[in-house]
Image (cartoon, helix red, strand yellow):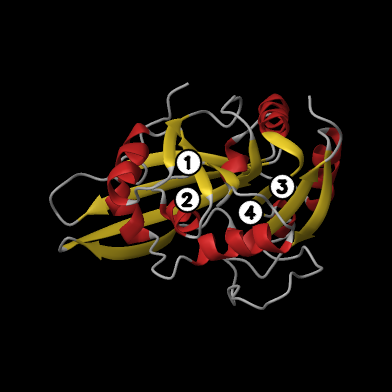
């Protein structure tokens, strides 16, 4: 399945300008999780995007494979964040070899919208992991949106400048309760040169106990499940900060160990 057109994922340099991470906070957080739980060197970064996190882990001495559905992202990663092996793969079902850890950061897992897609992703992760291997994931917290209607149905605007042009994004979030999806409509404008571009996307909303049950059903033992600190929390994670014990805020962070013998 091909990824739908997307202004940011189709233009990786623009993506990095919109979401800068000069201190490699996400990669450092992931490395901290892997180190604290004794993961081996072989890491699969699912939804690797521009390759920033994969390259950070590679520079730290790990053998990293970055996988993404976007060919534009993969070409950019090979050129700008060399070191890891980059491959095209769909996280909803893949077979890429054997690893000591699988990363699924920045809500990548939530692009699995249906139960069957989630089952395919988690089953593929389990098959990819050695017994005792780690799944490290970071995503939006579905429970955060319970009762927080002020976050929904009201457009918000953000802007940033890239290559001398002001890019503006007006975003509206809605909750599709039947499908359990957080839907986003984003309208982009870039200076005065181009007409507005509308893009639609969605994330599956998973709740903490639902996530525990899904992981257990697919042969994982949850070692950590908390709302922070993490690379996209406020305040953000830094070295030496211990994982939390609550799951109330807008991000979920999970570390799970694959149980049982090899498949």
Identify the residue shown where x is 26% and y is 45%.
196
**Which one is in front, 248 or 57?**
57
For the residues labelled 3 and 2, say whether their Cβ atoms are less than 8 Å apart: no
Secondary structure state at the residue bearing disc 2: helix
The answer to whether residue 24 is seen in the rendering is yes
Q: Which residue is mark 1?
A: 66
Q: Where is 237 relative to 76, above or below?
A: below
Of callouts 1 and 2, the N-terminal one: 2
Q: Which residue is mark 2?
A: 54
Write down the quadrant of residue 214 in the picture. top right
Q: Which residue is mark 4?
A: 138
Q: Which residue is mark 3?
A: 134
Q: Position of residue 229 (x, y in %)?
A: 66, 70
Q: CA distance from mark 3 to mark 2?
A: 16 Å
Identify the residue shown where x is 53% and y is 52%.
62
Q: CA distance from mark 1 to mark 2?
A: 6 Å
Q: CA distance from mark 3 to mark 4?
A: 13 Å
Of callouts 3 and 2, the N-terminal one: 2
Write down the quadrant of residue 199 in the picture. top left
Q: Position of residue 19 (x, y in %)?
A: 40, 60
Of callouts 3 and 1, the N-terminal one: 1
């Amino acid at each position: 399945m091909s990824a739908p057109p997307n202004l940011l994922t189709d233009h990786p340099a623009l993506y990095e300008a919109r979401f800068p991470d000069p201190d490699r906070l996400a990669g450092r957080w992931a490395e901290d999780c892997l180190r604290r739980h004794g993961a081996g060197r072989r890491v699969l970064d699912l939804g690797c995007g521009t390759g920033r996190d994969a390259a950070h882990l590679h520079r730290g001495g790990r053998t990293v494979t970055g996988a993404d559905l976007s060919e534009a992202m993969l070409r950019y990663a090979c050129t700008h964040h060399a070191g890891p092996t980059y491959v095209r793969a769909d996280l909803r079902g893949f077979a890429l070899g054997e690893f000591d850890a699988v990363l699924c950061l920045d809500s990548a897992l939530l692009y699995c919208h249906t139960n069957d897609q989630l089952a395919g992703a988690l089953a593929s992760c389990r098959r990819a992991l050695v017994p005792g291997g780690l799944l490290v994931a970071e995503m939006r917290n579905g429970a955060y949106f319970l009762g927080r209607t002020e976050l929904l149905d009201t457009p918000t605007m953000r802007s940033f400048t890239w290559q001398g042009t002001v890019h503006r994004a007006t975003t509206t979030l809605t909750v599709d309760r039947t499908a359990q999806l957080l839907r986003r409509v984003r309208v982009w404008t870039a200076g005065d040169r181009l007409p507005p571009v509308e893009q639609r996307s969605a994330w599956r909303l998973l709740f903490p106990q639902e996530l525990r049950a899904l992981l257990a059903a697919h042969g994982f033992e949850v070692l950590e499940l908390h709302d922070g600190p993490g690379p996209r929390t406020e305040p953000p994670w830094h070295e030496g900060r211990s994982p939390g014990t609550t799951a109330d805020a807008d991000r979920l962070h999970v570390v799970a160990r694959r149980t049982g013998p090899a498949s």
